[in-house]
Amino acid sequence: MSEAGGGRGFGSSVPQRAPWSLVAATAALCLVSATSVWTAGASPMSREEKQKLGNQVLEMFDHAYGNYMEHAYPADELMPLTCRGRVRGQEPSRGDVDDALGKFSLTLIDSLDTLVVLNKTKEFEDAVRKVLRDVNLDNDVVVSVFETNIRVLGGLLGGHSLAIMLKEKGEYMQWYNDELLQMAKQLGYKLLPAFNTTSGLPYPRINLKFGIRKPEARTGTETDTCTACAGTLILEFAALSRFTGATIFEEYARKALDFLWEKRQRSSNLVGVTINIHTGDWVRKDSGVGAGIDSYYEYLLKAYVLLGDDSFLERFNTHYDAIMRYISQPPLLLDVHIHKPMLNARTWMDALLAFFPGLQVLKGDIRPAIETHEMLYQVIKKHNFLPEAFTTDFRVHWAQHPLRPEFAESTYFLYKATGDPYYLEVGKTLIENLNKYARVPCGFAAMKDVRTGSHEDRMDSFFLAEMFKYLYLLFADKEDVIFDIEDYIFTTEAHLLPLWLSTTNQRISKKNTTSEYTELDDSNFDWTCPNTQILFPNDPLYAQSIREPLKNVVDKSCPRGIIRVREESFRSGAKPPLRARDFMATNPEHLEILKKMGVSLIHLKDGRVQLVQHAIQAASSIDAEDGLRFMQEMIELSSQQQKEQQLPPRAVQIVSHPFFGRVVLTAGPAQFGLDLSKHKETRGFVASSKPYNGCSELTNPEAVMGKIALIQRGQCMFAEKARNIQNAGAIGGIVIDDNEGSSSDTAPLFQMAGDGKDTDDITIPMLFLFSKEGSIILDAIREYEEVEVLLSDKAKDRDPEMENEEQPSSESDSQNQSAEQIASSSQEVDLVDQESPEESSLNSHPESLSPADTDDAASISPSEQNSNPTENHETTSLDGECTDLDNQLQEQSETEEDSNPNVSWGKKVQPIDSILADWNEDIEAFEMMEKDEL
């Protein structure tokens, strides 16, 4: 997502409005001086080791690209677990993720310029011929305008840029006559109808064949789009205009950027995440540098680099000043409200912000780039990959990792800027983790859950377009690349556009709309083209000195807020506030304290005790705050009883030939039998039970004796199946869903419940696989007969010498209280007799369902208990001390899904009057956050 070393990101100072040729020439010279700064610090990596790692990257690309071409082409993407292509409409819908697929061989187009960067010129020539021969851009399919622009249009333009470069060199592509450019122009015209709005902002989706609004188009009714979706067009559209001379593309992209700039929040100079494309009203008023906004900022700076238009730089600098003023909380980058930028909008960060350190390098602001990058690296060292989202105390919020390249991108640019060999070691770690945890026989599989190591049947095109480019360039010397990378700029999809476009076909009138709206501070331009002596002031250990304080920021972090106890509570020897865990309903002193805090206690007829808080009845605002905290703790304690039966996902790892542990399937746990988080994993060969449903005494006990039995779901209770296979001598059981086509990719985690009776007699582990994952094992049996698997709480090391080592339990995230409960002036909690958990008056969860006649009724599905999969899941403690995470993980295990939206107590509790005053203004933003999807 960043520029390739050249441009105005590096070098000694140049005039702001210097001719572009001067700027480009200066940039190339300056980069040399930037990369020569480091003479000490981390141990330098030898040329031989860099070559070895570069060759490893080449082999990894061959493995991914070769399997796509063999098993998936001409489909858009490869499904690496099932070794087949993903064709839209033939696989279960994944929602918005599928909008990138247009039946246009997406992965091939996205990989074109990667082939040239990796010196695979013969393969590039063959790939271009395949694109021209096979790809159809006139399909009746609705696609994302944003994704189609950055991946397909960008891929075609990047391919064209390097095709003409190779043709000029005289060895390859001599037959090429701008065919890719003509395809790009065709696609550009197909995207133009999306801009038919009063604002000039494009619709988020378009039908490649029928455009917008026509009945057969099946799109054109949307009203909202994300800021990045509308603001990440200028590079590709301007390049298309400059290549072809058709100015309409650049005009439309500029108009969209102008509108976004005009609609920024004037007091904070921030933009929201989503905007109404017709009215220009902000729909989501939270602002950050991650999902939904990220590449808008990136393209403002890069539009200045590529097009030489000062207004883009002025806008970027204005936004950047606001980002560093409000969003940047080194080393964190936290979303805020655009109208109240001092108020954090969430307590977690998404993985897409990993591009931002690279952008800061181009800006020249090195110190915060190093800090944020190091924080992200510490998270990766903890989880092997960067989770899709993680909390401010570095716990997993969303556990997926679709092999995103943004961190590798920032690593590359930090190395180019500093020359610090530390970043080569970071890149080496990325290579090792990809090969160790993501590599499968048919490519590289996305991580379903970074905590368990389970896989998802997915290999996105951006993995080949970006990851291998950045990793290869990280270890490559200048002579290892057949062209000068500094003559090009990287788009957000890492496609290469030549810098000479800045002086080609300049027919667009450049109206500077920036100064009409803001008075620019000259200090915004201090870092436009920094001198390396300023970046690294006479200290070759500068970057290391910045990183050092962050080395243990993840492992030693204490949840923000648990050490921030109000000093007022302890002044003059005053007693600390009453804690929920200490409360006794029969203690008169406790009842008096409740009354002082505005909390009423009501005894219900059914024996339950209900607590209700009215803040206005508290003796003081401080007492109201104590009451608010007490209610939060009580809600958490009450809901804990309902949560304690929830379990995290488990892993089924195929360890026999030819898999050798490289295929990891996401499995649902059972609430009975051997707990794999507390005992050693179970390993054995699999065998199908007879009868297959396992609902009666097995007729083939000799076949399952000492093995892991495969059973089909249905017709009886899960516990009954477990007892039958256990009596036959099985050492474990895998229940396979009888709902054909079901998959962990599209369905929530499934947990097997007991039968309402004592299940202590079941001593073997039981796991649940959806139909798709189960089919992978069944297909392996048909092909290889003997298949050995490992049942565990998380995937084990693929190294045979490491397979028997104990692995730490998967991290679990417990819940906080919802934002609405925190801010409400009247709250109530029902306290439940500990011996009667079924009488809890909190909202019912599926865990409390009574056993039914079939295993289906006795199961638990988080989709039923939580309709919002994106809520915050962060552990909150008010104990006043930091609890060791490892001990917490051994004591409790909880799924990510939770029924309460959360808010962190990472800062001091606001006075109750302030909370009430803010609530009406902030409720909309909180509600939108709950609906947020990455």
Image (cartoon, rainbow, N blue to C red):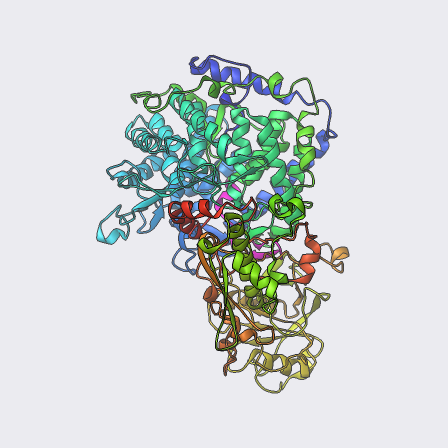
Q: Position of residue 37 (x, y in %)?
A: 66, 20
| Most distant residue in the left direction | 214
- Image x and y of residue 768, in percent: 57, 70
725 vs 144: above or below: below
Q: In which quadrant of the rendered view does residue 441 lie?
A: bottom right
Q: Which residues are magenta?
A: 444-465
- Give the x, y percent position of residue 45: 72, 31
Give the side of residue 676 with respect to residue 859, left or right: right
Residue 754's image quarter? bottom right
Q: Quadrant of residue 914?
A: top left
* Residue 228 vs residue 589, the one in the foreground: 589
Residue 110 falls left or right of residue 539: left
The mark total stands at 0
| Residue 721 magenta-highlighted | no
Q: Is residue 401 visible?
A: yes
* Camera-nearest residue between 17 and 89: 17
Residue at image location 42% in from the left, 36% down from the top:
154
Q: Which of the pair 432/171 is nearer the observer?
A: 432
- Relative to 549, residue 819 above or below: below
In this view of the protein, which residue sits in the foreground, 448 or 566?
566
Residue 104 showing in the rendered view = no
Q: Is residue 618 above or below residue 65?
A: below
**764 to the left or right of 329:** right
Q: Is residue 445 magenta?
A: yes
Rendered location of residue 480, percent (x, y): 61, 29
Q: Residue at x 67, y 78 (%)?
A: 762
